[in-house]
Amino acid sequence: MTTLLFLYSNDSPWPQALRDQFAAQGITFDAQAVDAAQLAQRLESGAPAQAVVAMPAAQLSAALAAWPDGPPCAISWISAAPEPALLQRLQAQGLAGWWPPTCTAQDLAAGLALDRWRWEERSKLRTALANAQSQLADRKWLERAKGIVADARGTSEDEAFTFLRNAAMHASLKLSDISRSVVETAFWAESLNQAGQLRMLSQRIVRLAAQSLLGVDRPRARALQTASIDSVQARLHFLQAVPHTHPHTPAVQSALAVVVDAWSRMQQVLAEKTGMEMLARLDVQAEHLLQHAESLVQALENASGRRALTVVNLCGRQRMLVQRLGKTAMLGELQQDASLRALLADMRSEVEVALLKMEMTPLSSPEITLSLRESRKAWLHLQSGLTQLDSVRSRAALCRSCDSLHDNFDQLTMLYEKSLQLLMS
């Protein structure tokens, strides 16, 4: 004897006569009264091969909504004739078939068999489509990973593919998993870099404003300030557009919103005429932006779950410290403030400690080693420039040293981003 699951609402009982006809054919029903939520729970827990449902259309639609990819078994609906549009909507939600309560048991038995066959065919098509979509997604990850590895190694994409395949075999992982990990690591590294640039730019904009007030290379300072303001806008645009491919965590979303607000406040001050009072207010807003950008970088690093990216954060932060040194030196000369000059010693120590950490990190390559050496030389040159700032010429030399060392650390940050050891970590 065959048993089918019959689920009905109190509003839609099934005629006893039809049950008796089915029983005469050796088919019985496990009948239960349920609402929409209970229907979904009953099918999930019981895992029947097929279910027959008698309930209002609204309840059935609510139950089917629990399975965006289709119900776990064939569901046939017994009801009075529905509107064609309503039946189409229910079928789009995964309903296998509809039958009137007036049909004979013999016809209904044949109809239920047809519904089950139809549901099984749809399930096969859904599975095939899902597999095809998964393969396409894997292919996209692989293509992107090949480009990243080829760029990092300076090789062709065919050689990058061989490298990724060998790495997957060595790690006993799928090629698609390795590819996705490489792409996501590159994405997080770039996001950290972009957010880290905001820290640096907050300090650079104030330094350039102070430099302009001091009359130090004024045309160049103004041009760099305009470029820095545009750069902040570009970094924020990148970070705000990211969720289309890698949705931000709530912590990152919150930190980014605060950064956007801090930049808006800083822009308001930048719109004022440059002067000592304006410069003081600008520095206050820049410190707020720096603080919030630091929080954003930390939120991104935490969200990435990749400890190796710490070196990208560390190196990127050096760019900010260099600009902060230059800003403090310019403000100290402009305001003749001895306390600001005293801060330079602590800032120099912070740069030195971070540089030593970078020189000791195991993530290295010949290019990184060479760039670290150049950064060390540029750092020594900048320190010597801090000792004498009593002339426009010496101040101009210091500002150019700041920009030169910033470029060194910027290049080093990009080298760390492309480091194969980091990408494969």
Image: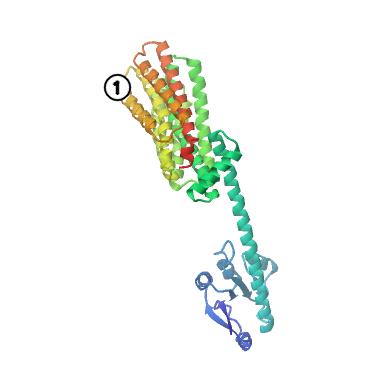
Q: Is residue 397 visible to the viewer in this orientation of the structure?
A: yes
Q: Quadrant of the C terminus?
A: top left
Q: Nearer the viewer, residue 151 or 3?
A: 151
| Res 12 quadrant in image | bottom right
**Height in image: 200 above or below 24?**
above
Q: Nearer the viewer, residue 361 or 333?
A: 361
Residue at image coords 45%, 30%? 266
Q: Position of residue 329 (x, y in %)?
A: 37, 20
Residue at image mark 1: 342
Q: Position of residue 289 (x, y in %)?
A: 42, 33
**Height in image: 16 above or below 60?**
below
Q: Quadrant of the N terminus?
A: bottom right
Q: Nearer the viewer, residue 161 or 90?
A: 161
Q: Position of residue 276 (x, y in %)?
A: 39, 20
Q: Secondary structure at mark 1?
A: helix
Q: Position of residue 253 (x, y in %)?
A: 46, 44
Relative to residue 339, is residue 242 drawn left or right? right
| Res 196 quadrant in image | top left
Amino acid of disc 1: Ala
| Res 286 quadrant in image | top left
Q: Is residue 243 visible to the viewer in this orientation of the structure?
A: no
Relative to residue 320, is residue 85 drawn left or right? right
